[in-house]
Amino acid sequence: MTYETHVSSGHPRAESIRIREQLTKHVETRVVALAGIIAHGRGEAFDYILGEKTILPAMRAISAAAAALLLAERPVVSVNGNTAALCARELVDLASVANAKLEVNLFHRLPGRESAIESLLIEAGAEEVLGVGDAASARLDEVHSDRRRVDPRGILIADTVFVPLEDGDRTEALRRMGKTVIAVDLNPLSRTAQLASITIVDNIVRAMPLLFSEVKKSRGLNAEELRTKVTTFSNKKALSDSMRLMEERLHALSEKGVYIQLHGRE
Amino acid sequence: MTYETHVSSGHPRAESIRIREQLTKHVETRVVALAGIIAHGRGEAFDYILGEKTILPAMRAISAAAAALLLAERPVVSVNGNTAALCARELVDLASVANAKLEVNLFHRLPGRESAIESLLIEAGAEEVLGVGDAASARLDEVHSDRRRVDPRGILIADTVFVPLEDGDRTEALRRMGKTVIAVDLNPLSRTAQLASITIVDNIVRAMPLLFSEVKKSRGLNAEELRTKVTTFSNKKALSDSMRLMEERLHALSEKGVYIQLHGRE
């Protein structure tokens, strides 16, 4: 069940609708699960409250994340349905510049889904994609979805995992295993946002190119400089600042009496 | 594409996941549209900020709504895909206790969709369901979706319409026709929330049983007492109070920064 809206580029919600269409067209290809569509709706609401722009705490998190990826010995970029549908190329570019492996990791491993995601990544230039089919032969404890299935060459032995649009269970499990977890999550209140080592509170579509540039730029730094970037970053403060910005914007919106109408349907 | 997750009741997000599953299983039956799935995600975001509990302004709105329904001469409970999927039984019970008619009203009238929703309501005990197929023969002005199509025996002649999870266009059209509109909307800034006569800022799943109990309880009151309940309720104040509670919660959380710790939860 798809729906199409051919909005003009001048429409006030054009970019948001374009992203939504990009995602919903991948429901049919099985890349995106219905749970992913719900998650996207959540993201839209939080993004609207944030003002649909990359806020300063997110830029700070991106800078720390870039440094953490470059410091890692075995970094992995974890890919799920929504991220593959929205930014396959950017994920491949990030893995390349950060010298990280790409691994498919899904909450719902439906038939054909992993290979559809693998195909998207390969079309986008990936040379190797971990975690597909039997390759995801290792198991994480205390994760009660297919997300527990990981590749022994990838997430299982990784020291730093980039997990955009993640669920709380796996974030928690990865942290308990002592890994550095970098998440992208528009909801600063989510379990993922709260439990990750570094949380980028931003729209994945905006954050990915920024993170790529930041990794590229930071490659010129030495280990000491990179470590300083990581240790001076406080995730608690970044989350706190993000919530305060949301609160301020809700206040401003309510003062103005501006409606939040996310091109709302039904 | 269905998915099943058998989350244990001890999971911190168990209730939210259960509701999600209830909704997504109805995408295949066509009861729920993809737009409804995205809208659910948006609702989840606002519910997070509210703290996923029924706040006092919502209880006040529920009390006024119960009185308005009992005072109405021709009350109608409008049913869309998401509400039918999440609380068919509660909608039927509410219509019964409030002596209201049930009418299907959809943004997208896809083939087979209306009858699937009608079936859900009948299974839940409804004896009559208006607005299905050719029965929705009247048209509302200035509504640019299938929501304009209404039943001449129902919404067209109603004096009070309960429109849970509504869109702004129709809320506005119904108000312009002089009807009392009762909405359930987690976003106090939406056009629906702003334009309804009585807005219950709450999750539909929590609000429906509360509204049912309140109508049942209020049946013992006389017309004068019911009218007082309606006239002393200010929707503007209820929305403003809801906004303030959301801001306060974000503020309190931003003070704490991280509130979910790796070892205990919230």
Image (spheres, coloured by chain):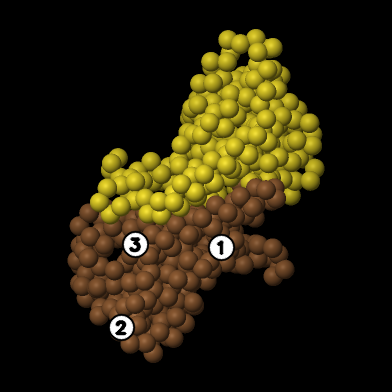
Chain colours: A brown, B yellow
Residue A224 badge: 2
Between B170 and A163, the residue placed more toward the observer is A163
Mark nearer the N terminus (3 vs 1) = 1
Instruction: Identify the residue shown where x is 30% and y is 83%.
Output: A224
Write down the residue under mark 3: A196
The reply to whether residue A40 is in sight is no
Q: Do callouts 1 and 2 mark residues in contact (Cβ within 8 Å)? A: no
Write down the residue under mark 1: A20
Q: Do callouts 3 and 1 mark residues in contact (Cβ within 8 Å)? A: no
Q: Chain of mark 3?
A: A
Give SS at disc 3. loop
- Residue A157 pos. (x, y %): 21, 73
Q: Chain of mark 2?
A: A
- Residue B226 pos. (x, y %): 65, 16
Q: Badge 2, how many Cα within 10 Å: few under 14, some, many 20+?
A: few
- Residue B77 pos. (x, y %): 62, 30
Give SS at disc 1. helix
